[in-house]
Amino acid sequence: MTNEKTSVAKSSLYGAIFITVLKLVVALWTGSLGILAEAAHSALDFLAAGVTLFAVKIADKPADSDHQYGHGKAENFAALVETLLLLATCFWIISEAIERLYAHSMKVEISFWSYFVMVISIVVDYSRSRALSRVAKKYNNQALEADALHFSTDIWSSAVVIIGLIFSSYHFYAADAVAAIMVAVIVVGISYKLGRRTVDALMDKLPEGLYEKIKKEIQKITGVENIVSLRMRQAGPKIFLDTTVAIKRTLPFETAHSIVSDVEERIIALLPNADAVVHADPVETSDETLMEKIRLIVSTEGMYPHHIRIFYISGKKIADLHLEYSDEFNFVSAHEVSEKMEKKICELIPEINDVRIHLEEIFAPALTVDITSQSALLVEQLEKIAQQVPEIHRCDNISILQLENKRLKIAMNCTFDASLSLDAVHSIVTKIENMITKQIENLDSVLVHAEPLKDE
């Protein structure tokens, strides 16, 4: 990438040197102010091409501790130098032309070489402009783009000089000075546009409509509730963007991270050369349920709630939940923590009138032994219990584990009609678990996994 940009910048520089020397020789020979103005213009092209080559090399340096946003602004400074040089030349050309028009007249010698040098200039400028424009577009390089625009206007200014030479050949020598003024006016117009773009870049002004375009694209992403902030700045071809997006605070971390990644990908798709930093700001949303709010409050304290239920009693809202405590808590300390949690929930959720917390201990993984293969009679007993429930179509995958205290942990799969409601299935599962608890001795726990009946 660097070699291609440097190569086209060097080619532009060599072309500018060749054209400048050629125009200067012919201008001094013929006395044409129009060609002399073009020679001065080309001399500035040579200087501007040198500045551009230098800027391209500097801008391609990677970011370092002193320039953490890279060196891309070197391109903008190069464009500013070009603008100032062009404007200085314009003032000189216009001043000299006015002096020739009103102070004295100078005869211009018109020859084949006068036309030849201008035609050669147009051909060289056209090839330079095309090469610069192609590479500038490929790498979004402002310095090369400015050079391409610069040299494309040289084509028109050279054409104006040729017209002036044609009029001068018919002894309308003032046409040469007028042509010079027209060249200067063209250059002033280009300088203004180039200068304005340069100042805008140095002042971190964004291209027209880019801010709204990026904002609309981010707002389309599922999971983004709002855009808290969006800032962009351009340094050479690179745009540095940072944005903060509001995301529902109850979402799991993985989901929130996925949304942030989607935002980054959407930005890069629109601005391939962007350096985007996306920050997520968790916010409360209007669709957040009371249970989600309670779960969030408890989890921020490093605790684990489950079985959260909300009851409406005589116009009041009562919350029930289970809290798991590690074995470092004793009964007194666990009770104190639960009381503080109850108060905090009521303070942060005023619509909750009362909170009731059930205390549970988080049990460490227990050493178990799978005794299913040695428990044929128990497996048969479990199957018979399941057969007593008409809603159960099949009972399989029975597992019997023996804990360290010799108590049994039973797990089994039961198949139900797919048309049943979740509440109905839960009620039946609870029923069979209770039946097993009553009929099996030395039982620690039983878990019945419900599966829908599939067509076979």
Image (cartoon, rainbow, N blue to C red):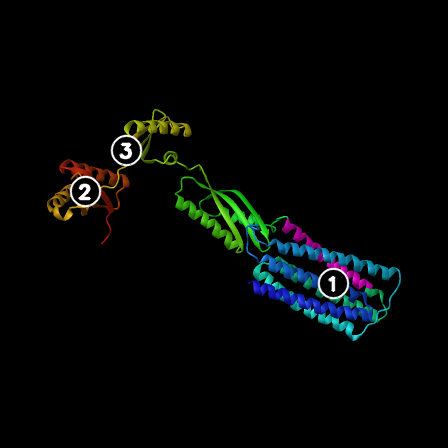
x 61%, y 60%: residue: 56
**The residue positioned farthest toward the right in the image shown:** 104
Q: Residue beneath label 1, please?
A: 41
Which image quadrant is residue 117 in? bottom right
The quarter in which the C terminus is drawn is: bottom left
Range of the magenta residues?
177-202
Q: Amino acid at mark 1?
A: His
Measured Cα–Cα span from mark 2 to mark 1? 92 Å
Which image quadrant is residue 292 in? top left
Which image quadrant is residue 431 in? top left
| Label 3 crowd (10 A; few <14 / some 14-19 / many >=20) | some
Label 1: state its secondary structure. helix
x 26%, y 38%: residue: 363
Provide the major secondary structure of the magenta segment: helix
Label 1 close to label 3 by CB (< 8 Å): no
Residue 31 pos. (x, y %): 83, 68
Residue 3 placement, left or right of 225: right
x 71%, y 71%: residue: 120
The quarter in which the N terminus is drawn is: bottom right
**Labelled disc at residue 410:** 2
Q: Amino acid at mark 3?
A: Glu
Residue 162 can be seen in this image: no
**The residue positioned farthest toward the front in the image shown:** 65
